[in-house]
Image: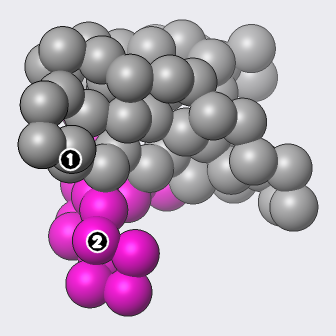
Amino acid sequence: MISAVTIDDLEFEYDDDISSYVSYVGGIDIVIQPLRIGFTAEIIDGIDVNRLGKFPSERWAKLAALKAAMK
């Protein structure tokens, strides 16, 4: 479980291979991908990929991904 981490603490780097922003927190990859309208978020834990859906803003996508990673 990840504790005391906020979305402002996350450091995202752009990954050209997947055209997404990626952050690594506590052994889990958080992936935020820009869309034409909004953003999509997913967390990757080992081989498990959990798609979280589409969000209207980058901040909402990051918040949802961080909350999912903390579980």
Disc 1 residue type (three-letter): Pro
Examine the rendered structure and indicate whether residue 11 appears above or below residue 53: below
Examine the rendered structure and indicate whether residue 22 appears above or below residue 57: below
Examine the rendered structure and indicate whether residue 44 appears above or below residue 9: below
Disc 2 residue type (three-letter): Ser
Category of crowding for the residue at label 2, using alpha-carbon neighbours closer than 10 angstroms: few (below 14), some (14–19), many (at least 20): few
Taking the spot 75% from the left edge, 23% from the top edge, the residue there is 1
Examine the rendered structure and indicate whether residue 16 appears above or below residue 49: below
Image: magenta residue range = 8-26
Q: Which mark is residue 42?
A: none
Category of crowding for the residue at label 1, using alpha-carbon neighbours closer than 10 angstroms: few (below 14), some (14–19), many (at least 20): some
Give the x, y percent position of residue 22: 37, 59
Does dot 1 land on a helix, a strand or a loop?
A: strand
Colour mode of the rendering: one colour
Residue 44 visible within the image: yes
Give the x, y percent position of residue 53: 50, 23
Taking the spot 28% from the left edge, 58% from the top edge, the residue there is 21
How much space separates mark 1 and mark 2, taking CA atoms? 8 Å
Left or right placement of residue 49 versus residue 5 in this view = right
Left or right placement of residue 41 versus residue 50 in this view = left
Taking the spot 87% from the left edge, 61% from the top edge, the residue there is 47
Left or right placement of residue 69 versus residue 62 in this view = right
Residue 5 visible within the image: no
Q: Are marks 1 and 2 in contact (CB under 8 Å)?
A: yes
Viewer-side residue, 2 vs 58? 58
Kindly indicate the quadrant of the structure image that contains residue 17. bottom left
The residue indicated by pointer 1 is 34
Residue most extreme to the bottom = 17
Give the x, y percent position of residue 15: 30, 77
The residue indicated by pointer 2 is 19
Count all numbered tags in the image, as a single digit.
Answer: 2
Give the x, y percent position of residue 6: 32, 18
